Structure formats: C-alpha cells, structure tokens
Amino acid sequence: MTRQPQGLILVTGKTNSGKTTTLNALINDINENENKKILTLESPIEYKHTSKKSMIVQKEVGPGRDCLCYSDGVKNSLREDCDIIIVGEIRDRETMDAAIETAESGHLVIGTLHTKSCAETIDRMINFYDISDQQSVKYLISSLLKLVISQRLLKGRNGRLVLVPEVMVVDNIIAGIIRKEKISVSEIEDAIQSNIDKGSIGLINSIAELFVDDKITLDQAKAQIEEKNIETLNRTIMQLKIKKQTT
C-alpha cells in the first residue's frame, strides 16, 4: 500500500501499542526500496533514518523546534516538493484538514491516530467535523483513505509482547459504507472479514490465530473482544484448529 502515488494511510492504536515502531518500519521499507522524497513530522523524533534509496528529511514539532504544530508542518510540506509526508499524530481538525488537502493534491500521507479499531478510526475522522460538514467529508475520506492498521500489544505466554493487528484495505465496498448517512461498525467489521483476499485482517482472526499458535491464553483472547463476539471467536478458533490439523 505504501507504493501508491497518493492517498491516506493511518496507523492507529492506544498509547504504547507500537504505532511509532510500525510507522517507522513503513518509512524504512520505502527508504530501502523506493526512490522518494519523504518528510517526517514528529514529536519527538524517536527513530533517526539515514537516506538510502529515498531522501528523508525529519522535522521535530513543538515550540522552538522545526515547526510549531503538526498542521503548520503539513501545510508547509507542500512547498518542499515531497512525495510522502509522515504525520506523527493527527489530533485535531486542523491537522486532519491539512492531511486530507495534502493527499488530495497528489501526495501519500501516512499518519497515526489514537483509536482502538479500524471502525472507530473512521468514526473519529468524521467526528473532527461539524455535522453540517460530515457528509462532504465522508466522500473525501472514502476516496482518499487507502489503508488503516489498528494494532494492540499483549504480553504473550512467554512474557514477550505479541502484536494483535486489525487491517482494513479500503475497497469499493468499504468506501460505500463510509459514504452512508449512518455508519455501522458491524458492517465495517464484516467487510474487513470478507476482504481477506485483498490483504485485510479481522481482529477476531488475529486473536484466534494467536491463541491457536499458543502465544496467548483463551482468557486474554476473550478480553480483547466484546461479549457478543465470543461465539464468533470460538467458531474461528475451531476452524483454524481443523485447518491446522489438515495441513
């Protein structure tokens, strides 16, 4: 997804869920394989990159730093002839506006949001805006958003942290759901589940695989989802066990 010429990619999760590590892994992958100019906006800069195939410019956000705030940094990036802009954190409407405008103008924008699921990410993006503006924003988001990675970190059986990913590749079906007057969380979750062949990963599938691979306990697995989804989790675990036994 990072090979696309333009659009919006979001890495989401709670604090200490590894968002910065994932974001910088994406930067490193582009740097090693693509000839691009990458501008990062971070507060603070946690990983220092050396330009390889790509040219990387890292800027720190904050008073007395390279730029005062994220929204200013994104707006100013349009003057720097960048291919890819990395936004360390989208926390307000001004930054979201700037990210959308930059993606719309032909850049790839990769940023982070503090949300706990792909569906909640869509909801959060829309709720940055007044109700009167939300329908037009939905159309923009549905056309510009390419990928949402929502992640969690759990302490596994061996004491090491394990990654629990949920990945939403935005296709025509999910874009259509985003444009609806009322967005259904369950519709988005079902669309993610049915879009596995395109690279999407459902949360329940991730949790079930970790349990079947003996990386987390069943109690940990159940604690990550709502009560109404326990039966689906049990069914998915059973299907994975059968598949494992037959391969």
Image (spheres, rainbow, N blue to C red):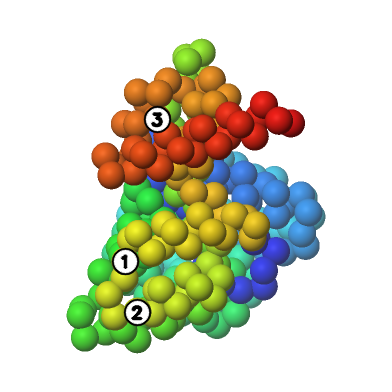
Determine which of the numbered discs, if any, sits on residue 184 in the image.
1
Residue 214, position as x, y percentages in the image: 54, 20
Q: Left of 146 or right of it: where is 38?
A: right
Q: Earlier in the sequence, mark 1 or mark 3?
A: 1
Q: Which residue is mark 2?
A: 180
Closer to us: 48 or 33? 33
Q: Residue at x 57, y 60 (%)?
A: 195
**How far is disc 1 from disc 3 in space, using C-alphas?**
24 Å
Question: Image quadrant of residue 82?
Answer: bottom right
**How far is disc 2 from disc 1 in space, using C-alphas?**
9 Å
Label 2 secondary element: loop
Q: Is residue 163 visible?
A: no
Residue 166, position as x, y percentages in the image: 48, 48
Q: Are marks 2 and 3 in contact (CB under 8 Å)?
A: no
Q: Residue at x 70, y 54 (%)?
A: 30
**How far is disc 2 from disc 3 in space, using C-alphas?**
32 Å
Label 3 secondary element: helix
Q: Which residue is mark 3?
A: 221
Q: Are marks 1 and 3 in contact (CB under 8 Å)?
A: no
Q: Left of 247 or right of it: where is 136?
A: left
Eyeballing the image, is 116 above or below 236?
below
Q: Are marks 2 and 1 in contact (CB under 8 Å)?
A: yes
Three-letter amino acid code of the residue under disc 2:
Lys
Residue 177, position as x, y percentages in the image: 41, 73
Question: Image quadrant of residue 37?
Answer: bottom right
Closer to us: 86 or 113? 113
Q: Residue at x 46, y 38 (%)?
A: 235
Determine which of the numbered discs, if any, sits on residue 94 in the image.
none
Three-letter amino acid code of the residue under disc 1:
Ser
Q: Earlier in the sequence, mark 2 or mark 3?
A: 2
